[in-house]
Amino acid sequence: MADKCHIYLLGLIILCSPLTGTSEVEHHVFFTDDENVTLPCNNVRSDCTTTEWNYYGEGYSEPDKLFSRGIKKNDTERHERLNLGSDCSLNIYKTTKEDYGLYNCWKNVNGETPYTENVYLHFLHVSPPSTQTEIRPGSSVTLSCQLYSDDRNTLCKKGFNLVWVNESGVNLQTDSRYQISSSPEHCYITLTTTLLNEDNNREWRCQITKGTEIKTSVSYTVKYLADSKTSIGLLLRVIIIIVEIAAVTTPTVILLQIIRERRAESKRRAETPRRLSETYYNLE
């Protein structure tokens, strides 16, 4: 009987031990350039005096402390873009690529048990063609889409996927005019195609999804550059038209001026005898 009690007690200790240790929750937040994002913490104390936010960037061996006991550290480069929400979540304004990485929120739920929420902030970015002079009909272009994250080596193995879609949301993998190449190990995908005349102002989007849910997306819009030969030809045509108009209008303007001057002279001559007559009459 004593042996059974020992076994039951040991089982109870094993079951209860996670409740007295440190608890962890993992979140994934996705963003692109110049967005406002919120990283969850869900603290039960609104004053955030038991909350600490730390940041681990790529290659960081030590955390960058952002908030300690609810007070912001002003020695961090991003302090002006950071603040805490009412539930002690971390708000980041006007995000940049440098913001991606691992954030963790440490807090005490009941004053005794340390509790942390790990938030992976992922940055999605599309790289345009290597040179803008390629953007014209008939040229081949390649767009690269990559997810920057401390967890990118495993994220695209956890059910997250990168896809290229058109303006209607149709996966371009199904269209033979597009060559799609991907590397799930590094959360990287490229799109290669030959541009058509009708592709001007066309939009392609790179999306990261999990199942049917779109986490975030970033778009690229094709903008054709004006051909230099066409521009020069158009300019010459405009100059020719201006010269032609001037050639037609200049003689006309001169002729009208001559007519006006002759009419004015005829009027003066007609008025001269009448004025002399009036002068003679007055003298009498």
Image: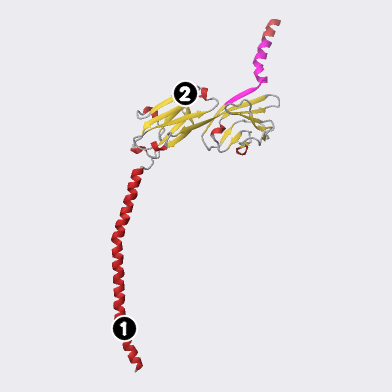
The residue nearer to you, when weighing 234 against 168, is 234
Q: Which residue is mark 1?
A: 272
Residue 232: x percent and y percent?
34, 47
- In the picture as drawn, the residue positioned furthest to the bottom comes out as 284
| Residue 171 in view | no
Residue 251: x percent and y percent?
28, 64
**Is 1 placed above or below 98 here?**
above
Residue 86 is one of the magenta-drawn residues: no
Q: Are marks 1 and 2 in contact (CB under 8 Å)?
A: no
For image coordinates 29% across by 77% down, the residue present is 266
Residue 213: x percent and y percent?
48, 29
**Is 80 placed above or below 159 here?**
below
Between the C-alphas of marks 1 and 2, the distance is 102 Å
Q: Closer to us: mark 1 or mark 2?
A: 1
For image coordinates 29% across by 59% down, the residue present is 247
**Residue 184 bears which disc, if any?**
2
Q: Quadrant of residue 220?
A: top left
**Is 278 placed above or below 16 here?**
below
For image coordinates 35% across by 91% down, the residue present is 282
What is the secondary structure assignment of the residue under circle 1? helix
Q: Quadrant of residue 91?
A: top right
The answer to whether residue 189 is left or right of residue 15 is left
What segment carries the magenta color? 8-26
Q: Quadrant of the C terminus?
A: bottom left
The answer to whether residue 57 is left or right of residue 177 is right
The residue nearer to you, when weighing 64 against 233, is 233
Callout 2: few (<14), some (14-19), or many (20+) C-alpha neighbours within 10 Å?
Answer: some
